[in-house]
């Protein structure tokens, strides 16, 4: 029986997807974590932890190096909440262009006699502009960014995307109407609206800072529904205070940006729809079961993609450092144990490699061969799976 631990609210549809080989259990010795935004950076991972699935897109709450060193595969559920974020972003674009929040706040407090007279007098304060024909820069054109770009284009906006790491799968999702910028500055310089949809990492933290903001034109509105810190709040406030930027809309509040008319904050609700939570939980459960039962890897953030049909009685998987002679050492250990390899595949991603070996017969006691492989230097984890 596999133990699955959760740290955040996971919808029932995800739990229902697990077969009876799985138990949802808040144990300290889980085989798998199915999580959302819990910050795992301070956690000491149990040795038994084989897989972490973040139901959602951002994985900056998971310490990847620590997970790798523990032999733990980390996955996300790509695209599961992208439509939810896109719809929120479209609402925010309209809200920004029509001063919607200020206007609604005014109307909610406009009471008493002469209400219509005052309304007609004051409504000019909330005059907006239309999105049609305005330019939107989309920084990061992955699952969310591509949907935002396409939807904005359908509203008649001129959309320019910037994504130096765009995958070919993602490129297929982008409308041919979206222009491609070769540099961040080229994307920013004529944009009326700028939105970021990149993962938070060393490169993207503060990417919308003094330099990027100064490359934008006067009157720009900036949106950050990706992660706090991608936009530098101090520099954003300077741009707002100087009148260079018109507004800042974000899903990530923090003290310094509170209580301003020109900043709209939502409480990290980008992925908070029933549909997105169901997608993430179901995809998450399926990812856990597939990895634990077949060892196949698809869309992991710390392991290379590697899948093969599991047609033999036994499969050995080895997660190890991407250094010379690992496959040789693994094959030698199996030969020493008189185990014949039916099929072997190996792939690497950055510093981590992964090997799948299918075998018909085991000559030694199960534990012995796994023990033997685990003791090879630079092996993070070896597992034996039965069909
Ligand atoms: N507010 C919320 O509740 C949600 C926030 N998010 C955030 O949005 C981010 C994006 O989500 P997805 O689109 O699903 O991820 P994704 O991985 O499909 O797309 C991210 C894109 O950013 C690009 N990218 C990476 N570094 C870049 C850089 N330096 N400059 C330009 N582009 C760069 C990648 O090539 C990729 O195409 C997530 O990492 C997460 O932090 C995602 C879902 C919900
Ligand atoms: O609602 C959640 O779990 C967070 C969504 C999110 O930020 C993400 O998927 O990256």
Image (cartoon, grey):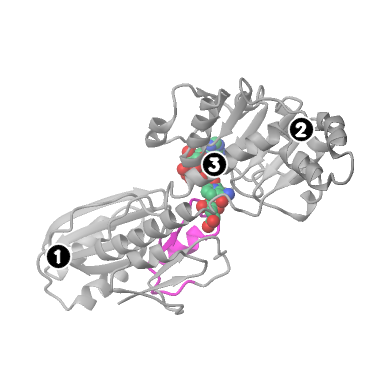
Instruction: Using the rendered image of the protein, determine whether residue 198 is visible from the camera's viewpoint.
Output: no
Q: Residue at x 10, y 69 (%)?
A: 361
Report the mark closest to the observer, 2 or 3.
3
Q: Residue furthest right?
A: 113
The magenta-colored residue range is 45-73
What element does badge 3 sit on?
helix
Labelled disc at residue 267: none
Q: Residue at x 84, y 44 (%)?
A: 110
Distance CA(mark 3)–CA(mark 1) = 56 Å
Distance CA(mark 2)–CA(mark 3) = 24 Å
Labelled disc at residue 335: 1
Labelled disc at residue 87: 3
What element does badge 2 sit on?
strand
In this picture, residue 222 sits left or right of residue 299:
right
Label 2 vs 1, first from the N-terminus: 2
Label 2 vs 3, first from the N-terminus: 3
Label 3 vs 1, first from the N-terminus: 3
Instruction: Using the rendered image of the protein, determine whether residue 315 is visible from the camera's viewpoint.
Output: yes
In reply to whether residue 46 is colored magenta, the answer given is yes
Distance CA(mark 2)–CA(mark 1) = 66 Å
User: x and y percent of residue 295 in the render?
Assistant: 27, 60
Q: Do the numbered discs 2 and 1 sit on residues whose CB atoms are within 8 Å?
A: no
**Dividing the image into 4 quarters, which one contains the N terminus?**
bottom left
């Amino acid at each position: 029986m596999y133990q699955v631990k959760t740290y955040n609210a996971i919808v029932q549809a995800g739990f229902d997807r697990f077969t009876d080989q799985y138990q949802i259990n808040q144990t300290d010795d889980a085989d798998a974590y199915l999580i959302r935004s819990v910050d795992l950076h301070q956690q000491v991972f149990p040795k038994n932890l084989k897989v972490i699935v973040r139901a959602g897109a951002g994985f900056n709450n998971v310490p990847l190096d620590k997970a790798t060193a523990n032999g733990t595969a980390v996955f996300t559920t790509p695209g599961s909440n992208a439509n939810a974020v896109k719809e929120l972003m479209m609402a925010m674009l309209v809200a920004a262009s029509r001063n919607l929040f200020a206007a609604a706040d005014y109307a909610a407090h406009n009471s008493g006699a002469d209400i219509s007279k005052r309304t007609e007098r004051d409504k000019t304060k909330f005059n907006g502009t239309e999105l049609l024909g305005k330019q939107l820069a989309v920084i990061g054109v992955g699952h969310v960014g591509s949907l935002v770009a396409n939807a904005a284009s359908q509203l008649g906006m001129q959309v320019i995307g910037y994504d130096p790491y765009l995958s070919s799968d993602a490129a297929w999702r982008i409308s041919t109407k979206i222009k491609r910028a070769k540099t961040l500055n080229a994307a920013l310089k004529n944009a009326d609206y700028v939105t970021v949809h990149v993962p938070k990492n060393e490169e993207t933290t503060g990417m919308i800072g003094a330099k990027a903001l100064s490359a934008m034109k006067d009157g720009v509105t900036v949106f950050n529904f990706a992660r706090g810190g991608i936009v530098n709040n101090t520099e954003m406030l300077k741009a707002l205070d100087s009148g260079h930027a018109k507004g800042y809309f974000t899903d990530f509040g923090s003290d310094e940006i509170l209580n301003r008319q020109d900043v709209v904050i939502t409480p990290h609700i980008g992925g908070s729809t029933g549909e997105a939570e169901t997608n993430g939980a179901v995809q998450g459960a399926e990812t856990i079961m597939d990895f634990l039962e077949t060892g196949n890897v698809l869309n992991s953030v710390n392991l290379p993609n590697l899948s093969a049909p599991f047609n033999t009685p036994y499969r050995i998987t080895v997660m190890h450092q991407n250094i010379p002679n690992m496959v040789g050492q693994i094959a030698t250990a199996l030969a020493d144990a008189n185990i014949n390899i039916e099929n072997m595949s190996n792939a690497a991603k950055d510093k981590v490699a992964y090997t799948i070996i299918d075998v018909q017969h085991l000559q030694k006691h199960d534990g012995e061969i796994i023990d033997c492989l685990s003791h090879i230097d630079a092996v993070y984890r070896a597992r034996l799976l039965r069909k």
